Amino acid sequence: MTAQSAAAAARATVYGYPRQGQNRELKKAIEGYWKGGVDADTLRATAADLRRANWRHLAEAGIHEVPTGDFSYYDHVLDTCVMVGAVPERHRAAVEADALDGYFAMARGTQDVAPLEMTKWFDTNYHYLVPELGPDTVFTADSGKQVAELKEALALGLTARPVLVGPVTYLLLAKPAPGVPAGFDPLTLIDRLLPVYAEIVADLRAAGAEWVQLDEPALVQDRTPAELNTAARAYRDLGALTDRPKLLVASYFDRLGDALPVLAKAPVEGLALDFTEAAAANLDALAAVGGLPGKRLIAGVVNGRNIWVNDLEKSLATLGTLLGLADRVDVAASCSLLHVPLDATAERDIEPQIRRWLAFARQKTTEIVTLAKGLAGGTGTIAAELAANRADLASRAGSAITRDPAVRARAAAVTDADAHRSQPYAERAAAQRAHLGLPLLPTTTVGSFPQTTELRTARADLRAGRIDGAGYKERIRAEIGEVISFQEKTGLDVLVHGEPERNDMVQYFAEQLTGYLATQHGWVQSYGTRYVRPPILAGDISRPEPMTVRWTTYAQSLTAKPVKGMLTGPVTMLAWSFVRDDQPLGDTARQVALALRDEVNDLEAAGTSVIQVDEPALRETLPLRAADRPAYLAWATEAFRLSTGGVRPDTQIHTHMCYAEFGDIVQAIDDLDADVISLEAARSHMQVARELAGHGYPREAGPGVYDIHSPRVPSADEAAALLRKGLEAIPAERLWVNPDCGLKTRAWPETRASLKNLVTAAHTIRTELPTS
């Protein structure tokens, strides 16, 4: 096919779409089901309505081929576990008794059975459930969900393409099941898994699928020759099947590197590649391998992870370059639109001109369709759209809100000394022990306490004018009093104020910093039914006035025990926001760090002796390619130290991280120079404690003993057993006792019971320690 005919064939498509609905109908239905107020049939009907609404919107917008199978009640990797029959032994009885309840048990656990481990989906803030596999795993095909959803879309008269997690990525994301030797490599199961995938794609073909998409994002990471050979063999075998649909292998989030020639040579009919940001290198690499003659290329030229309008002329130039490299070039976003909110037009509180800079899922869909039209028909067919796009880009570039000379001057004046504490850790630790007087194995929580319906109602009443500021503050004061009282009665050693005034750990601060925009409806799925509204980082950052001092000092006035000040760190403020794309991330991080430094210093001046600066996103934002990591870690760790480096030696700096693979960043954790770090460890059975010990980490650490992403209450014996594992790696004088993460999403009954058990476990282990 010539470049001209490839352009004429250009179509618009997407890989996935937000699941929740305009008003988070899916979240409400699922949580209603968990509470017994919604039955299974109603839940399924709600889900079907949302799927149909999404497909109809996509088709009406001009999307030629809609995705199916990307919709999920909880997580698409968990759906894949069900699809291939990889249900852990401990959950099989529940799944056999009731498939839906068993599915949620795998995700959330029950009082008697632990859930699957959860971690971040590559370098996004989406969490997936980690498959548990072993040498005895037997895979069996269950294509019911995928076939049913395909038939739903076809029944609407739509062209539909099922989307599945690819077999190689599925195995690379998996871990050895509990009890399986750590050296077991799930990728060795590829020969058992491929026949199951063959059966599933055959079922989809029989149901009417012309194409099936197999997502392989794991191939954008550094892969060994053996792993690449496995990928080549997997797609050689799948491509050799006779009764199958056309296969489209999709990868995204970064450049494919050595995996690109492997996929280009594979006997499949199409590839879907990311051509945004770092993945722009895919264009040169594709040309270097001679393109994709005779194959379909879906070009991801619209950023599926950020919310700024696309530069349409730049994307058209990329698409034009690609025309000669494939038999047919179609247009898409760089990845699933799961990672962005639904519709920017709903943001009525954002000034209209600024709102035109934003593109959420629906606006990105329009951009994709516009680009496909322009590619097929020439720029004259989209002249009006191009003119409007140029105006929007110029408006943003020239806006006064994007640049503050005072902020830039302060950031430029930072010295190396500003990013270091005045004394080394050993001297600080001695001063802090004398100042704080804490026992061995000190107990604390990570920060937030349950966000009750009453608290959310109070915030809504304040926004709606049903209560005034004084009434709202009185409600917050009362909640803080209850939280402090509970912690004292329970016996915790270092207390928190509970964060009742905070809607979200990033949004709360973003609303008080210059340069940020807040949304009202910009919900994005983090995991399961947990949705967040990432703020938008649009301009230079500064802190006009203290943000946390009032409530922290009020809490401290209620107790003689130390109360931690609680802040969100600079990297997490970036990672859980939609960041500006017009300057390096390191420059933005330094601005945020300086704003936080002011807050840290004000907390200390107000009498706060323990200050926690959370950085759960440090690992999440780690570049997927090893070659890109040193530069990132250099500015990321400097930003943390810059925010905390101005305090006295006897002020104890904590940080916190959760739900990530920490082994890759142990040196960076060390480089933060925090006095204490708390980390998720319950689901991973204290793996991080062993990783810290292996590195020789010299500071204090609290690997979590209470999994807060499950409603189950760990017993005191269970928490004590985890502590004993922790003590095998970390000496008692440096070990803290805490939950995995904040308690915002938990209910009060389970929180009370779990924390009482946590304190009991700490007391039990203290009695087992040798006396000096």
Image (cartoon, rainbow, N blue to C red):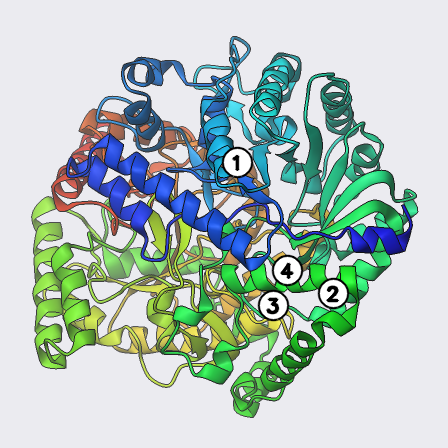
Identified by mark 3, the residue type is Leu
* Image height of 49 relative to 111, above or below: below
Location of mark 2 (residue): 374
* Image height of 553 relative to 282, above or below: below
Name the image quarter holding residue 737.
top left
Q: Residues within 10 Å of mark 1 (few under 14, many from 20)?
A: some
Between the residue at mark 4 and the residue at mark 2, the CA separation in whole angstroms equals 9 Å
Residue 745: percent from left, percent from top: 26, 48
Identified by mark 4, the residue type is Val
Identified by mark 2, the residue type is Gly
Identified by mark 1, the residue type is Leu
**Front in this rendered view, residue 605 or 485:** 485
Q: Between disc 4 and disc 2, whose residue precedes?
A: 4
Q: Are marks 2 and 3 in contact (CB under 8 Å)?
A: no
Can residue 707 be seen here? The reply is no
Q: Between disc 2 and disc 3, whose residue precedes?
A: 2
Location of mark 4 (residue): 369
Residue ID at (13%, 51%): 487
Viewer-nearest of discs 1 and 4: 1
What label sits on residue 154 in the rendered view?
1
Quadrant showing the N terminus: top right
Residue ID at (22%, 58%): 496
Viewer-nearest of discs 3 and 4: 4
Report helix, strand or loop for mark 4. Answer: helix
Can residue 436 be seen here? The reply is yes
Q: Are marks 4 and 2 in contact (CB under 8 Å)?
A: no
Between the residue at mark 3 and the residue at mark 1, the CA separation in whole angstroms equals 43 Å
Report helix, strand or loop for mark 3. Answer: helix
Location of mark 3 (residue): 585
Report helix, strand or loop for mark 1. Answer: helix
